[in-house]
Image (cartoon, rainbow, N blue to C red):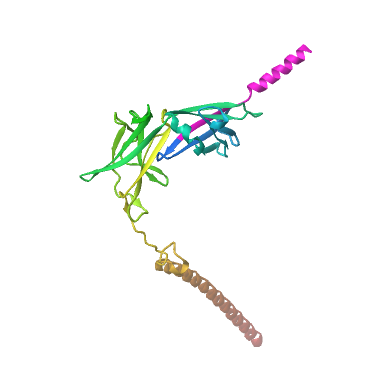
Amino acid sequence: MVLFLSIASGIVIAQDEEKPELLVSLHYFNANNNIQHLDVQTRIKANKKINVVKDVVLQLYLDSLIAENLIAKVRTNNKGQASSTIPVSLKDKWTASANHKFIAVTEATRKEDETVTELEVIKARISIDTLNEEGTKSVIAQVLGFSNGEWVPAKDVELKLGIRRLGGDLKIGEEENYTTDSLGQVKGEFKVDSLPTMDVKGNIVLVAKTEDNELYGNLSVEKTVPWGTFFKTESRLNQRSLWATRDKAPLWLLLMACSIIAAVWSVIIYLVFQLFRIKKLGNSATATKTHRVEEYSGSV
């Protein structure tokens, strides 16, 4: 009996130890100093591999694990991701303090244990401006952190200055990152010439942002400026081209196709003519042979 209990307990312990480790990543975002939201990524570590996990239920809290501080209850999608904005009901608690802690709690299942993940951030804001001196365009950004009830410059913060494009942000110059000075500012020269835009006014969107900063999270701000170049596009659907409809095919292509067709049919007609000619020659030879045979028989 004792042996049986020992074996059973060993099996249970082994099963518990075989539970894979659930990894939860929290990311804080603040867009244009107005919209704050959280992104969650769930992954699992098993057999020395890390894979995303879907359908993981998480409860997100602000500062403490009480019902009044619940931000949202979310479920990860097929990519193991979930997102939630900070509700208006927590606005007073958000503005009351300079430092905040986000807490993500996953529910325990048969496959994974309950996990608690925390992310601490300091409230901050970011601004962006432009400067044009003697034809040299520059982008200026500033980061301010909230401390002791006031906004103070944030020093040694890495920023990216770019141009918002559909495929991702384009650098304004040669530098990848810029570091704020004692005034919390960075300055980058705009070196992108004749950037095409869809806007007839040549407007482009400048962006300054931090990426997973240890203190402030992900801050971003945008500004629209007329520093691009509008190129008018003309439709060629009604002109002869390779991509046009059949009746608008290029003349050289029509000439080539017609020449090939004419050459093929010429060969076919020539072969048919030769066949008839061979048949006619064969009939003529047969008639001549028959006539000679008849003449020979008559003379005999």
Across and down, in percent, residue 106 comes to 59, 30
Across and down, in percent, residue 119 comes to 48, 28
Residue furthest toward the bottom? 298
Residue 253, image quadrant:
bottom left
Residue 214, image quadrant:
top left
**138 relative to 273 in the view: left or right:** left
Depicted 48 relative to depicted 196: above or below: above
**Could you tell me which quadrant the C terminus lies in?**
bottom right
In the rendered image, residue 22 lying in the magenta stretch gets the answer yes
Residue lying at 46% horizontally and 66% vertically, measured from the top left: 245
Depicted 166 relative to depicted 24: above or below: below
The residue range painted magenta reads 1-28
Residue lying at 48% horizontally and 37% vertically, measured from the top left: 37
Residue 105, image quadrant:
top right
Across and down, in percent, residue 18 comes to 64, 23
Asked whether 61 or 180 is in front, the reply is: 61
Across and down, in percent, residue 178 comes to 32, 33
